[in-house]
């Protein structure tokens, strides 16, 4: 058995028994929403931590553990590997067990169709799938089994974030060829069509989705994103202002830029600009560096917009430029913390703090549009809480 440091409590689990028998002998089992899996999967809880245990062939369990470790090193959105074991049962059969951390606040795709309250996220599921595959391919990861069933989704300020769950077939390379990316996309289209057909057979799929070609929509969105993150362009020596413009465009998509390559073209009268994209967590990393807050990428983008607004307001008031670090400190103390104190009941109901704050920002936008003027955070927060506390 191999376990990462800090998870010794897992040693008390009945590793010598087949996973299907754990219900009879393990008091740590908990019932959580899960997608369709060809393997036996069980969830176990220790204090505030929940783990997923999957049973599969021992060599494949070790290989998947190694792949998930590689994805973690590249800061890619996937479940966190905790350990793996090769065990021999009483009947002499050897099996492998893979242990990962359960992804808090995540849900399988079926939950997005079964709950009426989550209906507004269904269309965003396609963008989330396309974005996940682009991010994996940018990092040189060939998935090999991209599907809705192998993905978990987490709400992110009205959008969805997608996370890889199953890495059995994944391979990690320096870069991917066009053929590898095409193969992954073909697998995605086939698997997504199958996932949605399963839902339709169970009468859980909205009628409008039956008329729409969701796999092709994911493919189109993927192509748009890939074209943007991999694009090279030529600039004249006097057009260096286009470099930060390009970086900002990538940041707006959630990608950060690791390197900028400038190469002379022809007689040197023009330069070729190529940006090396590193990850899709630009805003959340920036927010964490400035404030210590942990948020999903789209949440962080909305919060950073507020920080930038605070910076502009302070600069006007003081009639001088204000560092972003100063503005973020003021925003944290004058906006975030007072709002969180008033949102305590919302957070206690199960809404994550950053998501609750972003819901208030979305409500503020709605009220301001209706009033044709900025109503301000306080008014939006008061109205939001009034609606939240109304009998449901």
Image: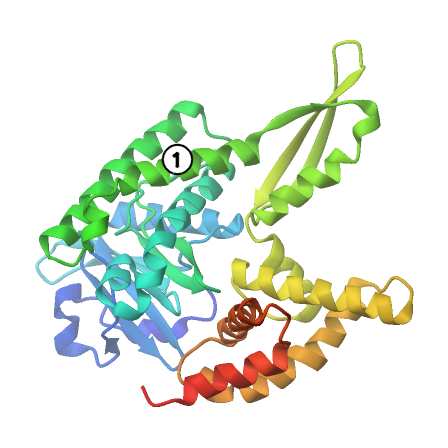
Left/right placement of residue 227 relative to residue 100 reads right
Left/right placement of residue 332 relative to residue 143 reads right
Q: Which colour scheme is used?
A: rainbow
Residue 145 at x, y percent in the picture: 29, 41
Q: Which residue is drawn at 9% across and 52% down?
A: 201
Report the residue marked by disc 1: 220
Q: Judge whether residue 195 can be spotted in this image.
A: yes
Left/right placement of residue 161 relative to residue 371 reads left
Q: Which residue is drawn at 28% across and 62% down?
A: 112
Residue 56 at x, y percent in the picture: 22, 52
Residue that lies at the very extreme toward the top in this rendered image: 267
380 shown above or below 198: below
112 shown above or below 139: below
Q: Which part of the image, by quadrant, shows the N terminus?
A: bottom left
- Quarter holding residue 335: bottom right
Residue 248 at x, y percent in the picture: 67, 45
Q: Looking at the image, which is closer to me, 79 or 222?
A: 222
């Amino acid at each position: 058995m191999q376990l990462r440091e800090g998870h010794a409590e897992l040693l008390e689990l009945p590793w010598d028994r087949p996973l299907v028998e754990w219900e009879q002998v393990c008091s740590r089992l908990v019932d959580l929403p899960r997608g369709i899996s060809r393997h036996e999967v069980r969830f176990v809880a220790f204090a505030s931590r929940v783990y997923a245990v999957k049973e599969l062939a021992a060599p494949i369990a070790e290989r998947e553990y190694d792949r998930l470790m590689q994805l973690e090193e590249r800061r890619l959105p996937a479940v966190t590997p905790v350990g793996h074991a090769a065990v021999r049962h009483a009947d002499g059969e050897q099996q492998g067990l893979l242990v990962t951390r359960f992804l808090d606040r995540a849900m399988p795709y079926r939950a997005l169709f079964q709950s009426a309250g989550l209906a507004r996220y269904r269309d965003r599921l396609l963008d989330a799938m396309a974005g996940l595959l682009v991010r994996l391919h940018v990092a040189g990861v060939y998935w090999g089994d991209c599907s809705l069933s192998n993905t978990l989704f987490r709400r992110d300020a009205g959008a969805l974030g997608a996370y890889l769950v199953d890495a059995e077939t994944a391979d990690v390379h320096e870069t991917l060829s066009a053929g590898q990316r095409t193969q992954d996309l073909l697998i995605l289209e086939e698997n997504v069509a199958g996932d949605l057909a399963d839902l339709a057979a169970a009468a859980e799929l909205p009628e409008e989705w039956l008329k729409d070609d969701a796999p092709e929509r994911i493919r189109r969105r993927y192509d748009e994103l890939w074209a943007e993150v991999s694009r090279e362009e030529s600039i004249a020596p006097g057009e260096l202002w286009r470099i930060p413009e390009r970086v900002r465009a990538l940041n707006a998509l959630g990608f950060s830029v690791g390197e900028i390559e400038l190469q002379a073209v022809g007689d040197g009268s023009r330069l070729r600009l190529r940006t090396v994209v590193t990850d899709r967590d630009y805003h959340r990393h920036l927010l964490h560096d400035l404030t210590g807050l942990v948020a999903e990428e789209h949440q962080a983008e909305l919060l950073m917009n507020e920080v930038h607004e605070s910076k502009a307001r302070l600069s006007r008031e003081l009639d001088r430029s204000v560092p972003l670090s100063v503005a973020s400190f003021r925003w944290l103390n004058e906006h975030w913390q007072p709002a969180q104190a008033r949102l305590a009941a919302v957070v206690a109901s199960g809404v994550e703090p950053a998501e609750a704050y972003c819901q208030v920002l979305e409500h503020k936008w709605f009220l301001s549009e209706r009033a044709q003027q900025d109503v301000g955070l306080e008014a939006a927060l008061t109205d939001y809480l009034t609606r939240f506390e109304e009998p449901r």
